[in-house]
Amino acid sequence: AGQLDLPGGSRRPVSPLFLFPLLRLRAGSALRGRRGALPGGDPRPHVGRRMPESRRAPAAARLDGRVFPLRRVLLLAAARRAPLRRSLRRSRPWIPPRRANRETGIARARAAPRRRLRLLLRLPPQRPPPEGPPPLRPRSSRRNGLPPRGLPRAPRLSRGPPSTRGAQLPARAASPERNPMIKALDSFRFYAFLAVFLFHVELFDGGYLGVQAFFVLSGFLLTPILVETQRYMSLRRYMANFYGRRMLRIFPLYYLYLLAAGLFVAIAFALGHHHEPALVLFRKQWLWAATYLYDFFYASAAFRETPLLSHFWSLAVEEQFYLVWPLFIWLVPRQRLVGALWFVVLLGPLVRFGIYWAGAHTGLSGWVFYLPQTVYGLPFSHFDAFAVGGLAALATGPQWRRSAYPLALAAGLAGLAAQGIFAEQISWKALGYPPFMCGEWKLVWGYSLLNLAFACILKAVKTNAFLPALFSPAPLQYLGKISYGLYVYHYPVIWLFERAGNGRLPPLLLNALMLAGTIAVSALSYELFEKKFIALKDRWFRKDGGKPRH
């Protein structure tokens, strides 16, 4: 079922059962080697102390096409007489190890009474020690602590939480080609943007819900990445990796746009356009956007809409989610994470109700401009959307492939049923959910239902169970890849075309030109500017913690 790659190019068959438990064993403090015993060729004895990093035998086991670094296993089995102890706390079942047989080189370990595992590790026979003095290491090896030339480096495992140290590293894909399921989610991104675009050109009143879909998608994509990386990274590396990758993706385009818009406004003012409302409001509001606090300004009574900045409130919510979510995933134990996410999901409607009640019955009423918009704009109202996305991403098993689409349909039907019960009339242009969920307390329960529907649709899309023909075309997947630029540029492009058209073009043609112009600007921005920073993500902050490829 698998092979063990030994230094020197030789391979030995290995039992598939040995991989998982044996990675959790390491040599004890009484480890004794002898001349010629280590497969790596280091003949020096090491008595009563831990083996240095550079003197551990580097090797890797291949099982079903995946590569597992085995830094300690060869050293352990080659020493033959070395006592073993666990290196992973809370391991279930506990594996009481035995010494390896000196003649056969087979190490056995007995598992819990209900489950017996036989661990086989076949090693080359021991050779007698070479005559004469031991060979010297190359100078560079002694100076830099590197293994001798001709041998692969032993992979360094980063320190992680005590319960995960020693866990195997995730295999890194040999090809940079994106997963087809991730490409389908790119198409979902474009559909979410298209809904927002139709809302801003006043063709679809429910298009603002595309922002809600973006929130759920962020939790769906980022939660499993954070759960995986915290298993084998220290807290410092974990935080630096996450924030470094996010900053390289978000900040360059964000601040490039603010700089370009600021120059545009300055030139317009120099040309005498002092009374254009959008330009005047940009000068008053740009600092809120530059500090990622625009969502709080959006929820206040001082807010006035400007097409140059008003859509940035959702980007501020996303950034504030990034501040909280990695630490939340790190602090919550893995076995309690699902329960914690459910707690956040159930807390969401209560938070929205509390914000609405506080705005209506306390002194905060003078601070808000329009109470449903305040509930919608504050970041506290949307953390349950990220949690629902995380729950959907962590849900595994074949039953999800069958149930995700029916659950999404059930959530939508439940929403329509609630509309029929509580609403006097349904706004079909907004699918029953008008902007800011005004009326019938929809701002309390409506967002929760839509979050659930979007999460189930995402799960069904990822498992290719939801209308695959709508998510598989390559052009849509490319548009999803540039959806960040589409969202940033679309509102100012709409404003510029409306100013230039000035009623001289048919509405349908004008809307088509707006969409085409947004796509053109976003594609140029992605190819000429954003790609350079995206390439730096894997160069400076790799998802595997900077480990070498295998």
Image (tube, grey):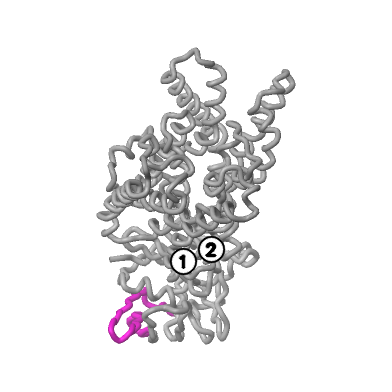
Residue closer to the observer: 448 or 406: 448
Q: Main secondary structure of the magenta part?
A: loop
Question: Are the residues at dot 2 and dot 1 in contact (C-beta closer than 8 Å)?
Answer: yes
Q: CA distance from mark 2 to mark 1?
A: 9 Å
Question: x, y (%) of residue 96?
Answer: 39, 86
Task: Name the residue beneath numbered marker 1.
Answer: 340
Magenta part of the protein: which range? 100-128
Q: Earlier in the sequence, mark 2 or mark 1?
A: 2
Q: Splitting the image into 4 quarters, where does residue 361 fall?
A: bottom right
Residue closer to the observer: 211 or 223: 211
Q: In the image, what residue type sits under mark 2? A: Phe
Q: Residue at x 42, y 83 (%)?
A: 80
Q: Is residue 369 magenta?
A: no
Q: Residue at x 43, y 71 (%)?
A: 335
Graded by Cα atoms within 10 Å as few (under 14), some (14 to 19) or many (20 or more), the crowding at tag 2 reads some
Question: x, y (%) of residue 422?
Answer: 37, 49
Front position among marks 2 and 1: 1
Q: Is residue 118 visible?
A: yes
Residue closer to the observer: 417 or 105: 417
Task: Name the residue beneath numbered marker 2.
Answer: 328
Question: x, y (%) of residue 257?
Answer: 61, 34
Q: Where 292 sits versus 60, above or below?
A: above
Q: Is residue 37 visible?
A: no
